[in-house]
Amino acid sequence: MSEGKISREKFISSLVIEMRKFHTSIVLFNEGIATKLHLNATDLRCRELLSHTGPITAGQLSLLTNLTTGAITGVINRLEKEELVERIDDPHDRRKVIIQPLYHRDDEITYLFKPLSDSLTDIFEKYNDEELILLSKFWNDINLLIPKESKKLT
């Protein structure tokens, strides 16, 4: 942004628009990856979430994703069919089921994301360490913001 050419307000607005465009493109990209795994983008994102959380109950997954328990049942069914998760009876509560992520297909998933990972690495290589630290802080802020904003939707 150079002074006099565009106001800070308009520049920030253009950044928000770029974030929305990024979101749309990443959703479409994830849908393409999910299709290769015989899933949909929501299923893939739930599996990704489970790979970070580890085993959690179906109810917890429902809360984390803002999906109904019925929708989560469908997600779990599809993930289980593709051998990406398994259901385990909760030893403390017979009414609950724990969703255990399975990792034997992680190499396949990593392979599908590798071209994007390589391209992102190429982009990151263009930045100096100080700029990369700023980018890291930015993405950390975004990753904290989105769940908070998602909770406002319920």
Image (tube, grey):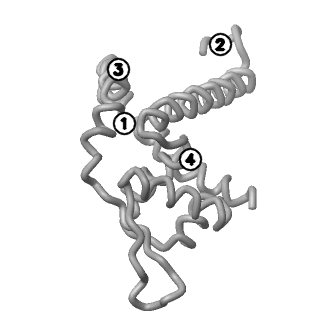
Label located before the other in sequence (2 or 4): 2
The residue lying toward the viewer, choosing from 128 and 115, is 115
- How crowded pointer 2 is (Cα within 10 Å; few <14, some 14-19, many 20+) is rated as few
* Element carrying mark 2: loop
Residue 75, percent across and down? 54, 56
Residue 27 to residue 94: above or below: above
**Residue 133 got which mark?**
1
Find numbered disc 3 in the image and state the secondary structure of the residue it sits on.
Answer: helix
Instruction: Please name the amino acid that badge 2 sits on.
Output: Glu
Q: Secondary structure at mark 1?
A: helix
Task: Report the residue marked by disc 4.
Answer: 42
Q: Quadrant of the N terminus?
A: top right
Left or right position of 95 against 79: right
From the image, tell me which residue sits under label 3. Answer: 119
Q: Position of residue 44 (x, y in %)?
A: 47, 46
Cβ–Cβ under 8 Å for marks 1 and 3 = no
| Disc 2: which residue | 3
Q: Residue 88, position in %: x, y?
A: 39, 75
Marks 4,1: beta carbons within 8 A: no
Query: Going 29% across and 20% down the picture, which residue do you hit?
Result: 125
**From the image, which quarter does the C terminus lie in?**
bottom right
Residue type of the residue flagged with mark 1: Ile
Q: What amino acid is found at the position of numbered circle 4 in the picture? A: Thr
Q: Nearer the viewer, mark 3 or mark 2?
A: 3
Q: Residue at x 54, y 44 (%)?
A: 142
